[in-house]
Amino acid sequence: MKKRFIFLGPPGAGKGTQAVEFCKKEELLYLSTGDLLRKEVEAGTSLGKEISLIMNRGELVSDSLVLSIVENCLSGESKGWVLDGFPRNLSQAKALEKLLTNINQKIEAVVQIDVGDDFLIERLLSRGRQDDNEEVIRHRLDVYKAQTAPLIEFYRGQEILKTIEGNGEIDLVASRIRKVLF
Ligand code: B4P
């Protein structure tokens, strides 16, 4: 079995925290659309400036932009991967399916990291990234519920969804993830 996984969850659920360590251990490609978008912002390009305005409002960046990033990274990838923060809506999920069929790859499992809103807000406020102020965080949670949460049913329907409790020590959450995947 190729290790090809998606980590799904609300902002601050710990997708990035868990996926980075998991990929180190398993020697997989780690792909965070959030990190790649932030790199573009840091580079100060005109595209980066546009992205920065969208991220700082807590909105989603356009599907076409995110898809082109993912396509470049996954084509020709053979070791396996974890996608962190992608797909973020149904249209990205369907585009990903098409892309994977074209390159003869498939998702083995989707790990849904479940954490209550109160914990999320507390965690993100203490992280303090540019898009981590309370008003923007609440908006990101609303965007998650409206656009990303429907993916839970989508992947449940494909029988590849694994849900874990994301509250608790980081190592404990990591062990819950390994338990549902291996
Ligand atoms: P992302 O970069 O994906 O970030 P996130 O959802 O805010 O955080 P994540 O869940 O990864 O939490 P983390 O591990 O960091 O998105 C940012 C923005 O990028 C989006 O709002 C959007 O604008 C844009 N974007 C990204 N992908 C997109 C896409 N596909 N389409 C369109 N737009 C897109 O953890 C958070 C904090 O919690 C950290 O401080 C961490 O130390 C702490 N933490 C983690 N686990 C913990 C635990 N178990 N206990 C206590 N604290 C914990």
Image (cartoon, helix red, strand yellow):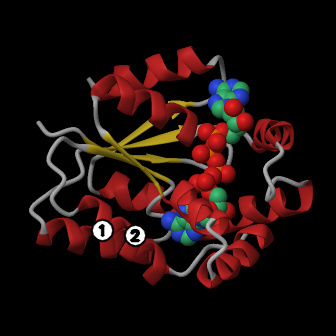
Q: State the image coordinates of residue 62 (x, y, percent, origin top left).
A: 54, 81
List x then y, in percent, for residue 119: 78, 35
Instruction: Determine whether the residue tagged by mark 2 lies in a helix, strand or loop.
Output: helix
Q: Residue 62 shows which numbered tag?
A: none
Q: Residue at x 47, y 79 (%)?
A: 65
Asked if residue 148 shows in the view, the reply is no
Residue 168 sits in quarter: top right
Q: 38 above or below 71?
A: above
Q: Is residue 58 left or right of residue 175?
A: right
For label 1, the crowd category at 10 Å Cα-Cα, with few meaning under 14, some 14 to 19 and many 20 or more, is few
Mark 2: C-beta under 8 Å from nearest atom of ligand 1: no
Say which quadrant the C terminus sits in. Answer: top left
Per the rendering, the mark at residue 72 is 1
**Which residue lies under the disc numbered 2?**
69
Report whether 27 appears left or right of 124: left
Expressed as whole percent of the image width and height from the top left, the position of residue 160 reads 29, 46
Query: Is the CB atom of the residue marked by disc 1 within 8 angstroms of ligand 1's nearest atom?
Result: no
The amino acid type of the residue labelled 1 equals Asn
- Quick check: 170 above or below 125? above
Give me the residue at 68% from left, 82% from top: 50
What amino acid is at disc 2?
Ile
Number of marks drawn: 2
| Quarter of the figure that contains the N terminus | top left
The answer to whether marks 2 and 1 mark residues whose Cβ atoms lie closer than 8 Å is yes
Q: Residue at x 67, y 72 (%)?
A: 44
The correct choice, above or below, for 155 with respect to 58 in the image is above
- As drawn, is 145 to the left or to the right of 174? right
